[in-house]
Every structure is written in C-alpha cells, then in structure tokens.
Image (cartoon, grey):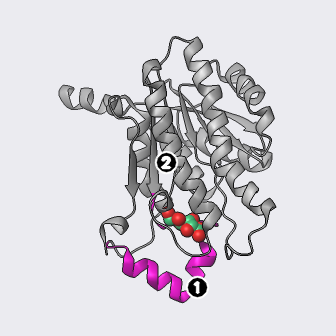
Amino acid sequence: MQARNKRMSLFDLTNKNILITGATGGLGEAIADGLAEAGANLIIVGRNEDKLNALKTNIESRHNSKVYVKPFDLNNIDAISGFFDDAVKSAGSIDILINCAGINIRGDAEEISRNDWNKVLTINLSACFFLSQAFCKHRKSLGGGGKIVNIGSLMCQVARPTTTPYAASKGGLLMLTKSLACEWAKYNINVNAIGPGYFLTKMTQPLKDDPKFNEWVITNTPMGRWGNPHDLIGTVVFLSSSASDFITGQIIYVDGGWLSFV
Ligand code: GCO
C-alpha cells in the first residue's frame, strides 16, 4: 500500500497552480475539473466572467482546490504579459500553463478572409506563444521549473478540406511546442502537446449533426466512437505532473487510434 501511494504521488498535483485558457470550453471544463481532482489550484481564463464564476463554484464545491477567475480576451495579444503578471499576483505563482483555448472558422480556402485567417491564428497560435513567453519569464524569476501543455489536434499532423487556417495553426502549434521544448529545457521547463481526435463539444456539434460526417468519424476511429472530453484527463494530468519530468517536445494523440488507421 505504502509503495503504491508513493508511485501514485508521481501524478499528484497538490499545491500546483495551473493556469488554463479556454477553461469554459468543451474540452477546457473537463480538463480543469480533472486537474482539480488531481489536487491542483486553478487560474481559469476565458472571455465570459459568468461562465468562469459558475465553473469556479462547481469545481470548488467538489474538489479541495482553490480556483481564481481571470476573464481575458486572448485576442488582446499586447495585454498578455500584463494579464499574466496580474494572474501571478492573485495566485502567488504559476507552475503549469495549459494552452487550451482554440477556435475554428471553417470554409473553402479560396474564400477565407484575412480577418478570419487572423482570428484563428491569433487565438490558436500567437496567444499560446505570448502566454508561454510570459510563463517562461515568471518561471525563470523563480529559478526555473514548470510545464506547458498545448492542446493541439489531429491537425497537428493531418488535414481535411475546409479547415485550412485551423490546420495551419495546429501544425504551427506542434512546432512551437518543439521549439520551446528545445530552448527552455535549460530552465527545466517541459513543453508538450496533446492531440485530441474527434471529440464531441459545442465546436464539433455541427460535424456530429451531419450524418455523413458522423459516420466518417466512427468508421475512421478504430475505437468506433467520438472522444468524450473526460478521455483527455489522464494525459493532461500526466504531462502536468512529475511523472513526465524527462518528456519534452512531444505530442500525445488521444484519438481512439485515428492516426494509426489507414
Ligand atoms: C473541426 C476540427 C476539429 C476536430 C479536430 C480533430 O472542424 O472543428 O476538425 O475541431 O475535432 O481537428 O482533432
């Protein structure tokens, strides 16, 4: 029993402060809840303060975790560093950054406007970079250590028509993960990513509602189903915890076998 507890403490996140963006989104809520269950305190970031407050109440009522609500619009790239400093002031320090916010604007590549292109690239890629930069500065000031987990997609690796800005942003996010892993290993900061397969959220509901698309997802996912946001928790906890201390620059696909299937 003793030995088992010791092993499990590898995954323990007690007293870790984790900042998560997109916290009230389809994947973010489940991830935030799972991290709190593993013992972490959370700094939850999103645009809608009411939704953030509801999530805080929900998490604090069920877990022994302190949740700080930080409304912020990630489009505001120039304000990211000030926002991050403010979040640090509230929580005392931030040990782990989870870049989970993401958007998709689908359409034919021939028709995508510059505005839509910029919107997707700003949230899915630029905001992740500048948050990571602020995080690195903070961790350096504490003598190093820390973890970044980027929420990617199957589209870090493969594409599908009508999702060009999204696929470009997620491909970029994978290389951002690898670049920062190489550069910040010297500060003992691990940078990894997770690539969810087709998960059922508000964002993918229109895809699920299309019978042909739904059939395509089920047939191409060896496990024969859409992912449930809770399917991500184990991997997020692993990459946030000391169980992954010698892993950096990696992406783990949580895809029910999608990428292994031809
Ligand atoms: C979409 C996207 C994603 C998928 C993802 C699979 O059109 O919204 O394809 O949200 O779920 O690419 O990883």
Instruction: Please tell me whether mark 1 sits on a helix, a strand or a loop.
Output: loop
Residue 129 in the image: state x and y as whole percent.
62, 38
Residue 163 in the image: state x and y as whole percent.
61, 69
Image quadrant in which you'd find residue 207: bottom right
User: Circle 2 is placed at which residue position?
Assistant: 174
Image quadrant in which you'd find residue 78: top right
Question: Is residue 116 visible to us here?
Answer: yes
Q: Would you call the spot at circle 2 few (<14 residues within 10 Å), some (14-19), or many (20 or more)?
A: many
Query: What's the magenta region?
Result: 196-222
Instruction: Please tell me whether mark 2 sits on a helix, a strand or a loop.
Output: helix
Residue 81 in the image: state x and y as whole percent.
73, 28
Residue 60 colored magenta? no
Image quadrant in which you'd find residue 258: bottom left
Q: Seen in the image, is 71 located left or right of residue 5?
A: right
Amino acid type at circle 1 is: Asp
Q: Seen in the image, is 224 located left or right of residue 89?
A: left
Instruction: Give the spatial CA distance, label 2 vs label 1.
Output: 29 Å
User: Circle 1 is placed at which residue position?
Assistant: 210
In this rendering, the answer to whether 157 lies above or below 109 is above
Residue 201 colored magenta? yes
In this rendering, the answer to whether 31 lies above or below 96 is below
Amino acid type at circle 2 is: Leu
Relative depth, front residue between 223 and 163? 163
Task: Identify the residue at image location x=71%, y=48%.
Answer: 54
Which badge, 2 or 1, is on the more N-terminal residue?
Answer: 2
Residue 214 in the image: state x and y as whole percent.
50, 82
Task: Identify the residue at image location x=71%, y=19%.
Answer: 89
Q: Seen in the image, is 156 located left or right of residue 2?
A: right
